[in-house]
Image: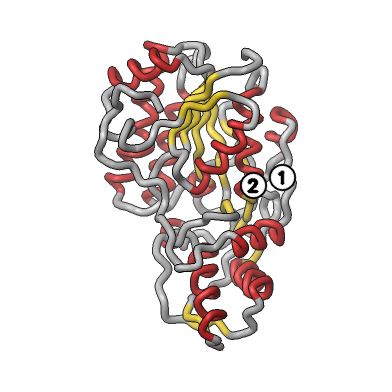
């Protein structure tokens, strides 16, 4: 790959995409069309091919897509978009590398105590996970001449996390409780364990995948390699925020149903360590402290990087 390649990035306005944009821009030229300039769902393969012809990227990074929605929304945003992008790359930029963000939700239910590896069977149990898995399948089944990879991101945490994620919602509710002096927060906590990975580590994994000389595999886990009880993570966030009150049931958290049937999730990240020389650097304390420090004082969050109705326009960003 050239010393100063051009990277075409979709989803730069989102939580993950924003972190990826900052990390890529530190060493490359990044073209990041806004959603009004190029909506991957509405765009045709020909329009995407035209954009690739104009930009001539060495790599295409896809961080865009909803985390809440219907099965049809997820299907259009993940497997349909991935199919269109693979076709556009074949037509207009066959040497460009495709790096797309997948999800731990693709694995479905994992045995407690097990670090799930890329070679383990994937049996997603949610519409979101099934759609992500279908998109990954398209990448895995692409021909040997296709340079493409999926980074299966586990539970990302850090500044800008949306309320579609439980810890993002917890930060908003705890902030409001601290401001008002409340001693109880309505937030249902269960016994689930999750692998929380810092958004900055996710961004580093994307950079590593973009710049790797070769990618021996099509799928890589991106997690912390440690499972933490969700209740403990929320309590840790509360401690960092100086909130000593209680958490009670009673408030439904938007979006958490996409993984509610999965009681345990933990990543084996050794493949990424071997092939990408990538390992997580941030602790959960780092991630929660950054999330709390960057919280919106008005308690507002933008849910996900949901694609809108525009097509790919003449400007590439």
- Looking at the image, residue 89 sits to the left or right of residue 267; the answer is left
Image position of 91 with respect to 232: above or below: above
Seen at 34% across and 24% down, the residue is 315
Q: Which colouring convention does the figure follow?
A: secondary structure
Residue 193 visible here = no
Seen at 51% across and 44% down, the residue is 103
- Looking at the image, residue 17 sits to the left or right of residue 73; the answer is right
Seen at 60% across and 70% down, the residue is 234
Find the distance from the CA under tag 1 to the CA under tag 2. Answer: 7 Å
Helix, strand or loop status at disc 2: loop
Q: According to the image, label 2 marks what residue?
A: 223
Q: According to the image, label 1 marks what residue?
A: 280
Quadrant of image for the N terminus: top right
Rendered location of residue 20, percent (x, y):
56, 38
Name the quadrant containing residue 235. Answer: bottom right
Rendered location of residue 179, percent (x, y):
53, 80
Helix, strand or loop status at disc 1: loop
């Amino acid at each position: 790959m050239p010393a100063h390649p051009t990277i075409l990035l979709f989803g730069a306005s989102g939580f993950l995409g924003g972190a990826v944009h900052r990390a890529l821009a530190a060493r490359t030229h990044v073209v990041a069309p806004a959603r009004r300039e190029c909506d991957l769902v509405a765009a045709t393969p020909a329009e995407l091919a035209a954009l690739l012809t104009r930009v001539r990227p060495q790599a295409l990074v896809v961080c865009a897509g909803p985390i809440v929605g219907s099965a049809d929304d997820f299907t259009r945003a993940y497997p349909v978009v991935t199919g269109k992008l693979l076709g556009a790359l074949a037509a207009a930029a066959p040497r460009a590398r495709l790096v797309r963000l997948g999800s731990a939700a693709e694995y479905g239910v994992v045995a407690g105590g097990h670090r799930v590896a890329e070679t383990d069977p994937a049996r997603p149990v949610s519409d979101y996970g099934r759609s992500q898995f279908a998109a990954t399948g398209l990448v895995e089944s692409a021909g040997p001449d296709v340079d493409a990879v999926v980074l299966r991101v586990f539970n990302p945490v850090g500044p800008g996390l949306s309320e579609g994620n439980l810890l993002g919602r917890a930060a908003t509710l705890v902030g409001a409780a601290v401001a008002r002096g409340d001693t109880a927060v309505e937030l249902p906590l269960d016994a689930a364990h999750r692998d929380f990975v810092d958004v900055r580590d996710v961004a580093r994994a994307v950079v590593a995948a973009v710049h790797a000389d070769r990618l021996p595999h099509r799928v890589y886990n991106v997690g912390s390699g440690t499972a933490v009880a969700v209740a403990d993570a929320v309590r840790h966030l509360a401690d960092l925020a100086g909130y000593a009150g209680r958490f009670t049931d009673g408030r439904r958290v938007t979006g958490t149903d996409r993984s509610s049937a999965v009681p345990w999730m933990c990543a084996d990240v050794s493949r990424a360590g071997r092939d990408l020389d990538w390992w997580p650097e941030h602790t959960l304390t780092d991630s929660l402290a950054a999330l709390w420090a960057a919280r919106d004082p008005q308690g507002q969050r933008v849910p996900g990087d949901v694609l809108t109705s525009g097509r790919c326009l003449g400007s590439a960003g």
